[in-house]
Image: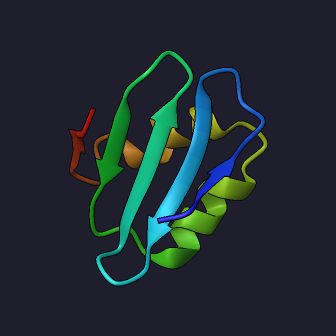
Amino acid sequence: PEMISVDSSTIDSIGYDDNSQIVYVRFINGGLYSYHDVPFDEYENLLNASSCGSYLHNYYKGTYSYEKIE
């Protein structure tokens, strides 16, 4: 999916796959993670959050299953 750069101290870019409802998060320090079964509006919330890193930590971890891709 297309990755959109975000203004964050920890996250480089975020992408979304509509078909599989997967959010992709690439971190500045390396590492690409996929978060599964995420509704589109929740992806938009992450993309538009004042702090993407904090939003990811508070609303994604422990809510959506994830895996490290690279």
Q: Which of 25 and 61 is in front in this view?
A: 25
Q: Position of residue 59 (x, y in %)?
A: 47, 48
Residue 39 falls left or right of residue 15: left
Q: Which of 30 and 55 is in front in this view?
A: 30
Q: Which of 2 and 24 is in front in this view?
A: 2
Residue for point 34% across, 84% down = 19
Q: Is residue 63 shown to the viewer in this render? A: no
Up/down of 8 relative to 65, above or below: above
The quarter holding residue 62 reads: top left
Q: Which of 27 and 1 is in front in this view?
A: 1
The quarter holding residue 12 reads: top right
Quadrant where the C terminus is found in the figure? top left
Q: Where is residue 28 in the image (x, y as percent from the top left)?
A: 56, 22
Up/down of 67 relative to 23, above or below: above
Furthest-top residue in view? 29
Furthest-bottom residue in view? 19
Please give the count of numbered marks on the rendered protein.
0
Scheme of colours in the image: rainbow
Q: Where is residue 21 in the image (x, y as percent from the top left)?
A: 35, 74
Q: Is residue 21 shown to the viewer in this render? A: yes
Residue for point 42% across, 80% down = 18
Up/down of 65 relative to 53, above or below: below
Q: Where is residue 5 in the image (x, y as percent from the top left)?
A: 70, 45
Residue 62 falls left or right of residue 5: left
Residue for point 71% across, 36% down = 51
The quarter holding residue 6 reads: top right
